[in-house]
Image (cartoon, rainbow, N blue to C red):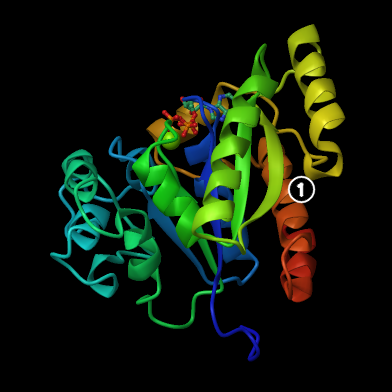
Amino acid sequence: MTASRMTAETIAVLSQKGGTGKTTAVRTLADAFRRAGVSTLAVDLDPQGNLSDYFDLPPDVEPTIADVLSGRASTDEAIHDDLIPANLSLAEAELMLGAKMGRELTLRRALAQIPGGYELILIDCPPSLGLLTINALVAADHALVTAEAQYFALQGVEQAMEVVELARDSLNPELELLGVLLNLADMRTVHSREALASLRERFGKRVFDTAIRSSIAYAESAERARSILDYRPDLGADYLALADEVLARLPGFEDARRQVAGLGG
Ligand SMILES: Nc1ncnc2c1ncn2[C@@H]1O[C@H](COP(=O)(O)OP(=O)(O)OP(=O)(O)O)[C@@H](O)[C@H]1O
Ligand SMILES: [Mg+2]
């Protein structure tokens, strides 16, 4: 890790809609970054716990992010294999959080306690723009918005952007839009091409050049709790290209980019 890096760059991955590939993006980017030698912490902030499953963590592992947010555990204790997991108890923790002073700042304070050494933190948000996603945006330096390559993609991204701006204007002026990712794309279809065109028109260069191709292999890889980089390296090339673009938009990851370039094989 670079000596000059005092704190990790934190990226919240969010979308207004469900099923836009947030969890798959966090799982696979974390894998790509780690292979490139970047010390990466993943945070599951979704009561569905899909990210924890995809990393093959036992479902009863404790403490979880819910324990951290409700003050029952330290952040340090909740890190298991470079992941802070979640399960359904996070739904209850979110309700309790709603009644607390500083409820939007709870995750930010928790992540500030993270032991040194992590260079990147990726937060997997739930499919809503509620208090948990707000917490992620207040805790993050960067927002990565995912969109499914379908009708209304632009509308979903606009709504997510409104919440990003809300977080920036109120509690986190440092927050930046890292980029917009077109996911589950099939460029042979007019839907996917139109979704990409409308996002490019609205967000220009903020849209990543890489669109993640749609493939049933992603659901299979999740079911097997294996990274797509192992399960289908040919498809994994999409995420390696995205990993490179993400690192290029962050300060100080030139070495890691060279490592990513070597992963393609
Ligand atoms: N590129 C892809 N092509 C096809 N299917 C994909 C792709 N990426 C993810 N999927 C599948 O689509 C479904 C939704 O993906 P994922 O869980 O990553 O989305 P999400 O945005 O995290 O969903 P949620 O909003 O419920 O948290 C999963 O079954 C996943 O395996
Ligand atoms: Mg998810």
User: Label 1, on which residue?
Assistant: 241
Query: Which residue: 81% across, 22% down?
Result: 198
Q: Viewed as shown, does residue 235 lie left or right of 225?
A: right
Q: Crowding at label 1, few (<14), some or many (≥20) Cα neighbours within 10 Å?
A: many
> Measured along the vertical axis of the image, is residue 230 above or below residue 160?
below
User: Three-letter amino acid code at disc 1?
Assistant: Ala
State whether residue 102 appears in this view. Answer: yes
Relative to the observer, which residue lies in front, 57 or 205? 205
Q: Position of residue 205 (x, y in %)?
A: 85, 43
Quarter containing the N terminus = bottom right
Specify the farthest residue to the bottom.
Answer: 3
Q: What residue appears at the point 59 percent right and 37 percent down from the top-left corner?
A: 162
Q: Is residue 265 visible?
A: no
- Any atom of ligand 1 within 8 Å of the CB at mark 1? no
Q: Nearer the viewer, residue 198 or 80?
A: 198
Measured as percent of width and height from the top left, residue 138 is found at 47, 57
**Residue 263 quadrant:** bottom right
Give the image location of residue 196, x and y in percent. Answer: 79, 24
**Figure quadrant of the C terminus:** bottom right
Residue 58 x %, y %: 22, 49
Residue in front for this viewpoint, 20 or 169: 169
Which residue is pictured at 80% across the width and 8% down the height?
190
Q: Is residue 187 above or below residue 257?
A: above
Q: Is residue 104 positioned above or below 117 on the image?
A: above
Residue at 43% across / 44% down in the picture?
A: 133
96 vs 193, left or right, is left
Left or right: 159 with respect to 99? right
The secondary element bearing badge 1 is classed as helix
